[in-house]
Image (cartoon, rainbow, N blue to C red):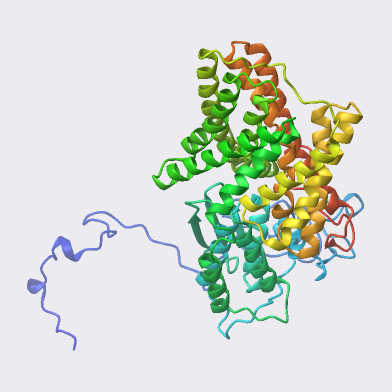
Amino acid sequence: MVAEQGGPEDQKPQSDEAHSAFAPPAGVEQPTAPPEDDHPTSEFALPAGLHNDPSAASGPGQGSASGSGQGSGSDTLSSAFVPPSGYNAQQQPPAFTPAHGIPMVRLTKEAPWQDRMRTMLRMPVFERPAPEMVQKTDDSGPAVPRVLDLTLRIGELLLAGGEGAEDVEAAMFAVSRSYGLDRCEPTVTFTLLSISHQPSLVDDPITASRTVRRRGTDYTRLAAVFRLIDDITSAEHVEVSLEEAYRRLAEIRRNRHPYPGWVLTAAAGLLAGSASVLVGGGVLVFVVAAAGAMLGDRLAWLCAGRGLPEFYQFTVAAMPPAAMGIALTLTHSTDVRPSAVITGGLFALLPGRALVAGVQDGLTGYYITAGARLLEVMYFFIGIVGGVLLMLYLGVQLGAQLNPEARFVPNDRPVLQILASMALTLAFAILLQQERSTVLAVTLNGGVAWIIYGAMARTGGISPVAATAVAAGLVGLFGQLFSRYRYTSSLPYITAAIGPLLPGSATYFGLLGVAQNEVDTGLTSLFTAVATALAIAIGVNLGSEISRLFMRVPGAVEGPSRRAAKRTRGF
């Protein structure tokens, strides 16, 4: 209903609230607007008064990018797809896409999943092939949050078990792709794992993360995780649903260690005793070194049960072997070598596993994780140094005649030293909680490493550091071959085998020199120990890379078949 209009006397001025905020006030003349055209101009048209250069138009395809493209008083606009006026087809730069197209990357199913995933991780994102879904999901697609959570849990077990950052990323990448998640980017640092999935270019990414709180050395659990990943990624005839993967992962977590505590303590004694034989000890030295290492292991377990950090555990574990070596010196025994007792105890404590993992992460481009791992190794080493130095200082004050010139005995018993190196490797494998099926292979690998070292350093007169690097390279090569044959991690075949090469003797004599105020001699020996440790780590990594270099690795059909890790030549 429309209200009737009243007379002039009924028309009153409206209130301020009734006026529009944009209405001109009373008494101000409003400019008359020009009549609007029936067809408004395009938003891409040139404004009035601005003329387009007619030379820029070439060809009949002129007009606005949106249609008519005519503004008031403007010339006809050229198309957005018309080449500029200075374009010359004969002098054009080479096209980004070749005429025959970009070759498709095909990944061979025969290669282990580690090589396939590592190859894709080293590719640019736009060159990675589309994921081939190995495991079936429901009609609505994969459950993205559950897949990401499963991927993080698997990566957590691998990182806590001592795997390198690149191998952890490859495993996470493999699991996510097997369940159909494309455009996933895993990230691994020393304590944090994260993975990001972007469904499409217009959707928001989904990111999940997980923190590694505790680390434990259990290579049996590590091998079980690798078998699970292999079933998820490579075995198409095996259907591993998300529920089945979660169930198997829970069983892996609940599984008990393969060796009880007393076996681990006995293995620590065997390791220290075998190491003392390697540096010239006899039967008595073997027994004393084993007793000191077992006592130190029990003390370390006691400290761990009370919640003390690992730094203090290493400090306490290093004290009993050093104390027993000093006690042998105070008894004025002439047929024993106290230095061999202390050196054997150091062999059982040196963090060779963490050192190899740290250097490997640095060589493959994961510098943050490598720096954190090497810092952890430095703290452990300082803890060992503190415990040994404290005992050595007390021994010097008590009048113990510690001879810093006592070095290795002449190489007149090679068979005994080879057997001792194999026993040391066996004990190291037990301490790492390896599967019983891998103990024999790694024991033989450690014996071969000591044979190579002895032949080069003792018989050939080559520098011990260079001989150590060559022997460690063979360890890495053989370990990689064993792992490819068993489709599992290479750590169980490598870590224990480098035990005989660890610089226990150089570390002891360096600490002894510092305790006896012979700082220059002590630092020289300590630098030798550091160089030997780096030679071990670099040799192991180089041996692993050489094994991949001469074997078929999946990659592009044309061009280079393998990408370098992260960066090449610094840019």
Instruction: Estimate the x, y position of residue 75 in percent, counting from the top left.
Output: 67, 58
On screen, 548 above or below 148? above
Extreme bottom residue here?
A: 1
* Number of dots carrying numbers: 0
Quarter where residue 351 is shown: top right
Instruction: Estimate the x, y position of residue 320 in percent, counting from the top left.
Output: 53, 32
Residue 350 visible in image: no
Residue 27 visible in image: yes
Q: Residue placed at 42% from the left, 41% from the top?
A: 308
**Image side of residue 459 versus residue 112, left or right:** right
441 vs 396, nearest the viewer:
396
Instruction: Estimate the x, y position of residue 220 in percent, counting from the top left.
Output: 63, 61
Q: Quadrant of the C terminus?
A: top right
Instruction: Estimate the x, y position of residue 529 in percent, counting from the top left.
Output: 70, 27
Q: Residue placed at 36% from the left, 57% from the top?
A: 31
502 vs 78, nearest the viewer:
502
Quarter where residue 385 is shown: top right
Q: Quadrant of the N terminus?
A: bottom left
On screen, 535 above or below 168? above
**Image side of residue 166 versus residue 48, left or right:** right
Q: Residue placed at 80% from the left, 58% from the top?
A: 482
**Image side of residue 255 versus residue 83, left or right:** left
466 vs 78, nearest the viewer:
466
